[in-house]
Each structure stands twice: as structure tokens, then as C-alpha cells.
Amino acid sequence: MTDVERFCAAHHDGVFRYLRRVVGAAESARDLTQEVFLRVSRAGVPEANDIGQRAWLFRIARNLALNHLRDGRRRPPTVTFGSAAVPATQELAVALSHAIDALPDLDRDVFLLRETAGLSYEEIAAASELPLESVRSRLHRARQALRATLGHSLALREQRGVRCLPAGTRDGDDR
Amino acid sequence: MSSELEIIDAFIDGQRVDGEAIKRALADPEGRAYMVDAWLLREAIQEDETRTSHAVTTSVARSAKPAPRWLVAAAITVSLLGAYATGRLTGRPAPLVGAPPAATVVAQPTSAFPVPAATRVIQLEFHASNTSGGD
């Protein structure tokens, strides 16, 4: 396995998760993920530390996603289930998708880079070309907005208990 | 208060934070509530990722599943029988050897290609002879 292949395998899931949240549709996210790694394989992974490489990778992913949205292939509306058809476990997921969609663009981007891709503050700053302080404040603002919107759902969920998870993984990855 | 909550953000995001600052932030009930909500948000996102990933994998697996063997065999049999029946119904006998062609197409000169005037005329005469051949 070459360095590029190893790099792609290590970050494929994170890139796909981030893109799926940004563009909305899994099919488009899959195409864009392929495009990201096609560019990586053409350009080669730059000589940098791990932080620099991940920031570089997600800058490519972010730019492709923004172009995709800008090209008029608009984000499809979030699927809303009828209230009778929504299981309790999915209620928060649907509300969460709407709440994330409602965030300001940059706040949403910073939040998704953190929570779906698991990037550190420094990596987010490099990937989105923002100062570190701006990353901190945008992330905080996004969490506060989501908390305000989802207060009731989060309170219901709290009754099930809470556990400490690292960002950027999928539930069950640690099992 | 916002800066204290940002300390909590940094703490749950794995950043190095000042010990005293995080103690102060978590001494406030609002700080503790904020931290619990941040964990719940993260958990909700990760559960959704898992569910979506499972749905995508299932749909890809379904679409990539090959047709059952009996269906492939049935399709081949039907197509062979269909081809045979079509051949029987529309097939024509092969033409007899030596039979004249049904029609001969001769290119006709058109006005676009004017025929030049003849420079020599050759006349051929045929004379039937009773002396040669026969009885």
C-alpha cells in the first residue's frame, strides 16, 4: 500500500461524513469524496505533519463542497418524516439536521469540521482559512444555537444518560 | 459567562485548558448543563452518522446484489426460445442455385453527366446458321 493509498484509507470516512452533512445527499457526497481523493492522488500528499495534511485534505473537500453548492446544485431539503412515522430515536436526528441547516454558513462549517471530521481547532483554522479565535467563537456560537433550538429534545435525551465521546467518530466505532 | 463556556468547549474538544479555569467553569450550574448538552449533541450526531452509514451501505448492497441463478437461466431459455420461434415464423427458403436474379439495377445517366457524342459506331450482325450443330 502506497503512502497516498494509506492516507486515503485513513481519511475516507471522515471526508464522506463531512461532505454528506454539507451537501445533504449521500450520492453527491460519495461523488465529491471520490473527487477529493482523485485530486489527492494526482497532487500527492504534501510533505507536512499530520495536522497540516488533514487541514490540506479538508480544505480540498470544503472547496469542492462549496463549489458544488454554488453551482446551483442546491442542497436538497431535509427529509421530514410524518410525526406518526418518526421513531423516538430519530426525532432528535431530524430536528438536529434542521437546526444544523439553519446555522450561518461559516458557523455550520466550523461545527461540522469539528463534529463530523474530528479536526482540531488548528486544523479547522487552516482548512477554513480563519483565525484560531474565530474558530473558537464560531464553534461556541454554533453549539449555543443548537442547544437553544434543540433544548427540549436534548432534555428528553438526557434521561437516557450521557456519555463522553471523542468528536469525529461514529457511534459504535469504539466498540 | 461566554468565555467560561468556551473553556468548556475547549475541554470537551480535547484542547489543553487551564485547570483552575475549567474548575471555575464547571462550578457554575450553567457550565455543567452546557457540557452535558454538548456531549448529547455529539452523541446525537454520531448516532445519526451510524444510522445513515448503515442505510447507505444497505442500499448499495441491495443494488449491487446479483440476480439469482434461476432468474439468469430462465432469461437465457426464454431468449433462446424466442429467437427460435422468430426464426421459424419469418424465415424464407434459401434461393435456388442458378436462378436468375430478381432484378438488375442499371445506373441511368443523368443530366448531371452528359453523354459524349459517339466517335465510332460498331454494328454487330447475328446470322443464324442451319448447317452447324443439331441433326
Image (spheres, coloured by chain):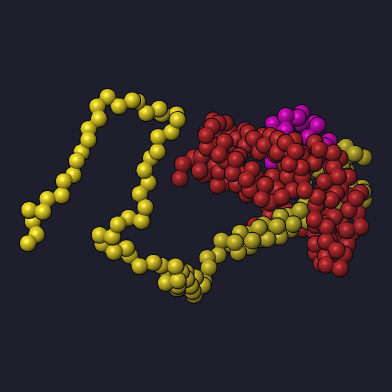
Chain colours: A red, B yellow
Q: Which sits in the foreground, B101 or A161?
A: B101
Residue at 12% x, 50% y is B129
Left/right of residue A32 with respect to residue B15 in the rendered view: left
Front position in the image: A155 or B27: A155
- Quarter location, residue A162: bottom right
Give how far across and how far down residue A136 sits, in percent.
80, 36
Seen from the viewer's position, the closer of residues A45 and A169 is: A45
Find the magenta span and give its range. Answer: A119-139
* Most common secondary structure along the magenta stretch: helix
Magenta stretch: includes residue A120: yes
Residue sitting at x 30%, y 57%:
B100
Residue A123 highlighted magenta (yes or no): yes
Residue at the (25%, 30%) spot, across then down: B121
Do we see residue A58 in this rendering? no
Apparent side of residue B106 relative to residue A131 in the rendered image (left or right): left
Residue A156 x/y as whole percent = 88, 62
Is residue B90 or residue B127 the one in the foreground? B127
The number of callouts visible is 0
